[in-house]
Image: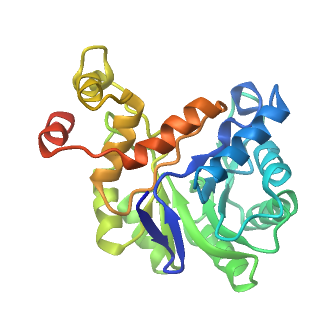
Amino acid sequence: MSTVVLGGDLPLNRIGFGAMHLTGPGVWGPPENPAAAVAVARRAVELGVNFIDTADSYGPGTSEEVLAEALHPYPPGLVIGTKAGQTRPSRREWRPVGRPEYLRQQAELSLRRLRLERIDLYQLHRIDPKVPADEQFGALRQLQDEGKIRHIGLSEVTVDQLEQARRQLEVVSVQNMYNLGQRRHEDVVDYCERENIVFIPWEPMASGDLAAPGGPLERVAKQLDATPAQVALAWLLHRSPVMLPIPGTSSIAHLEENVAAGSLELSADQLAELTPAS
């Protein structure tokens, strides 16, 4: 796989792993098969994945605990990025909370669950509209100054919000929803590419008309003897050199399929077929 450099000092292979599904149904509670969840995380690293994305809200807390059980002591070069700022009052609720004291508390809990002295990438899961954004950014900067986090990222932000944050701290990654069929953050991708900020698309598999049976995605997949999911991931890698997809799964077979997409080459004609005008 090709690589991208996070924060100027962390080289990462460009297919990562999203650990959200190492939890129970609805991203709630422990996995139904804990041994299988551990096996998936270990297999990801065996396949060369060296960036794993998680969050305190996955479980809540469960995904971080599974990763520590599976991989600690962590092999050299493995980067685990986690997030805070999104709470789970119940199985079906996701609510942003960005009070500085809350973000600091969650960082301490993530350090404990992950068994780390320092988190390599700590991302604000959502900007809380009820709390001044500068206060939320300041809490992350303080954690960084104290050596508890190495690099800072943001999630689900606009270009304006990203620029606001960069006036206060160095932002090394942006994690927004983006895939072949959901491209509303094109301007954020372009901004990240210009500024050499790693873009981590969540929900990276294609959706919508392009992914419909008999559609462009399926046609190109047949040409390449690949799966539509692999083509969707390969398209992301072709879209920008700062792109770092994090497909998630609880299946080793799907994990292996996803990682193999890193070596898939798309022709100019295939890219044109897959990429309709914005």
185 over 122 or under it: above or below: above
Tell me residue 18's x, y (percent): 60, 45
Which residue does the image show at 53% across and 61% down from the upper left? 154
Q: In the image, what residue occupies the spot 59% across and 58% down?
A: 51
Q: Is residue 219 above or below residue 98?
A: above
Is 142 or 211 nearer to us in this picture? 211
Question: Residue 176: percent from the left, percent from the top?
Answer: 46, 50
Whether residue 136 is visible to the viewer of this picture, yes or no, is yes
Would you place residue 262 above or below residue 276 in this image? below
Where 56 falls versus 256 (above or below)? below
Q: Is residue 25 left or right of residue 240?
A: right
Quarter of image, res 29: top right
- Choose top left, top right, bottom left or bottom right for residue 118: bottom right
Q: Does 253 sit left or right of 242 as displayed? A: right
Left or right: 116 with respect to 224?
right
Q: How many marks?
A: 0
User: Would residue 184 be seen by someone viewing this image from the given angle?
Assistant: no
Q: Residue at x 85, y 60 (%)?
A: 109
Q: Residue furthest bottom?
A: 145
Extreme residue toward the top, this view: 213
Q: Residue 101's spot in the image, x, y percent?
A: 79, 66
Residue at position x 44%, y 57% in the image: 1
